[in-house]
Image (spheres, grey):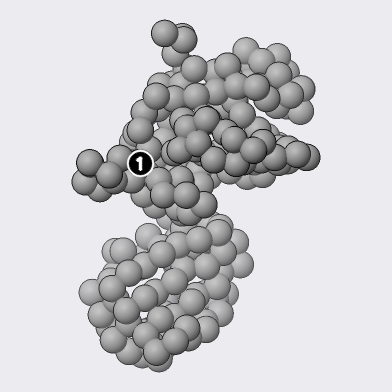
Amino acid sequence: MDLTFRQVGADALLVRAPDGETVAALYAALLARRDELPAITEIVPAARTVLLDGLADPELTRQRLAGWRLPPHPPADGPLIELPTVYDGADLAEVAALWGCSPAEAVRLHSSFEYRVAFCGFAPGFGYLTGLPAPYEVPRRDTPRSSVPAGSVALAGPYTGVYPRSSPGGWQLLGRTSVALWDTDREPAALLAPGVRVRFVPVAAA
C-alpha cells in the first residue's frame, strides 16, 4: 500500500493515502478486518487520511497496516438512502451551462448517478458524496453565500452534498430536500455515514 503513517499523541495514528479511492478502500478494510488489529476506539475517514483513535498500541497497528494489501475499489455495499429533491436551486442554470446542457438535462444527470458517502465533516450531518464523474466537477462559487438554507443540495469539485442546517457556503446550489440530515432526537443523529449510498430522486415542489 502507498500509505504514510504519523502517530498523533499517545494513542492515535493518522494514515495518509494518495487519493480518495484508497481512503475508501482502507476504510472498508478497517471495518472488515478490525479484529486483526489492536483495539481501536474510533476510525475517522477524511479526504486523504484516516484517523485511528484510541489505539491500544499505535506502533503495532502501524506495522500490521503496513502489511495489508487493499483491493483497488471498495465494494459499494452500504445501505441505500433516497433523497427526494426539488431541483430549483439558484445555481442550476449555471451548473447546466458548465456541463453544456439544459437545466432539465442537468437534473437528469445529477439524479442518474449513485453516490457514496466518503467522509463527514464541515457541519454535523454533512456527508461528502463521491460518485460524480470527473467531467461534471464544478468550481465553488467565486463569492460564498452568507447563508445557505438547510436541505440545500449542492455541488463543489468532485463532491455533492446536502447542507444539514443553514450556514454560510460556497457550493453551487442545485435544489433542496426536506429530509433531515441531522436530528438529535434520532439514533444515530446523522442520516449519512461513510459507506452509505445515496440517490437523489427528482420530485415536484409541494
Identify the residue shown where x is 47% and y is 83%: 8
Q: Is residue 114 visible?
A: no
| Left or right: residue 137 compared with residue 17 | right
Residue 33, position in %: x, y? Answer: 29, 69
Residue 83, position in %: x, y? Answer: 40, 27
Q: Quadrant of residue 140?
A: top right
Residue 183, position in %: x, y? Answer: 30, 40
Identify the residue shown where x is 32% and y is 69%: 42
The amino acid type found where label 1 is placed reads Trp
**184 relative to 11, above or below:** above
Identify the residue shown where x is 56% and y is 79%: 4
Counting labels gives: 1
Q: Is residue 87 visible?
A: yes
| Left or right: residue 49 compared with residue 99 | left
Depth check, front residue: 177 or 27: 177
Identify the residue shown where x is 58% and y is 16%: 88
- Mark 1 is surrounded, within 10 Å at the Cα level, by few (under 14), some (14 to 19) or many (20 or more) other residues, namely some
**77 relative to 33, above or below:** above
**198 relative to 88, above or below:** below
Q: At numbered mark 1, what does the secondary structure look like: helix, strand or loop?
A: loop
Depth check, front residue: 53 or 27: 53
* Quadrant, the C terminus: top left
Depth check, front residue: 21 or 126: 126
| Left or right: residue 47 compared with residue 116 | right
Question: Which residue position holds label 1?
Answer: 182
Residue 154, position in %: x, y? Answer: 58, 33
